[in-house]
Amino acid sequence: MSAVAAEPKRILIVDDDVALLRVVREALVASLRCEVDTSPKPEYAFELSLKKKYDLLIFDFQMPMIDGAMLFFSDWQSLSK
């Protein structure tokens, strides 16, 4: 019986606090051994979410220009088509 390695889970974190992104990313990678993409810019995160499939999206709900709720609903509508 051959063991097939499961693909690591993918997480996207969006927050305008770059230091927080770094700390959370390092903690998740170390503890969960997952792939973590981060972005301080919601528009870039939106593009990433269209290119890759993520298992978990974490958004800051108070960002300049667009908040996490708007990003979530934009993402949700695009991905559900």
Image: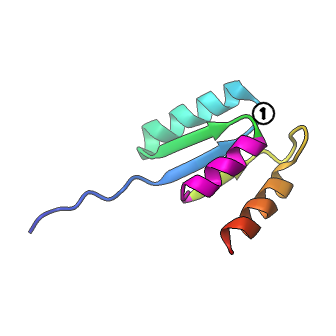
Which SS class for mark 1? loop
Is 33 included in the stretch rendered in magenta?
no
Badge 1: residue crowd in 10 Å (few <14, some 14–19, many ≥20): some
Q: Relative to residue 34, is residue 45 drawn left or right?
A: right
Measured as percent of width and height from the top left, residue 42 is found at: 77, 43
Q: Is residue 7 above or below residue 62?
A: below
**Quarter holding residue 31:** top left
Looking at the image, the residue that sits furthest to the bottom is 81
Q: Relative to residue 30, is residue 81 drawn left or right?
A: right
- At a point 56% along the width and 36% down the height, the residue shown is 25
The stretch in magenta equals 42-55
Of 25 and 77, the residue lying toward us? 77
Is 53 included in the stretch rendered in magenta?
yes
Measured as percent of width and height from the top left, residue 59 is found at: 74, 48
- At a point 17% along the width and 62% down the height, the residue shown is 3
Measured as percent of width and height from the top left, residue 39 is found at: 67, 37
**Quarter holding residue 78:** bottom right
Residue type, label 1: Asp
Looking at the image, the residue that sits furthest to the top is 19
Dominant SS in magenta: helix
Pointer 1 residue: 16
Measured as percent of width and height from the top left, residue 41 is found at: 76, 37
- At a point 45% along the width and 46% down the height, the residue shown is 34
Of 16 and 75, the residue lying toward us? 75
Q: Could you tell me which quadrant the N terminus lies in?
A: bottom left
Q: Relative to residue 14, is residue 56 drawn left or right?
A: left
Colour logic: rainbow
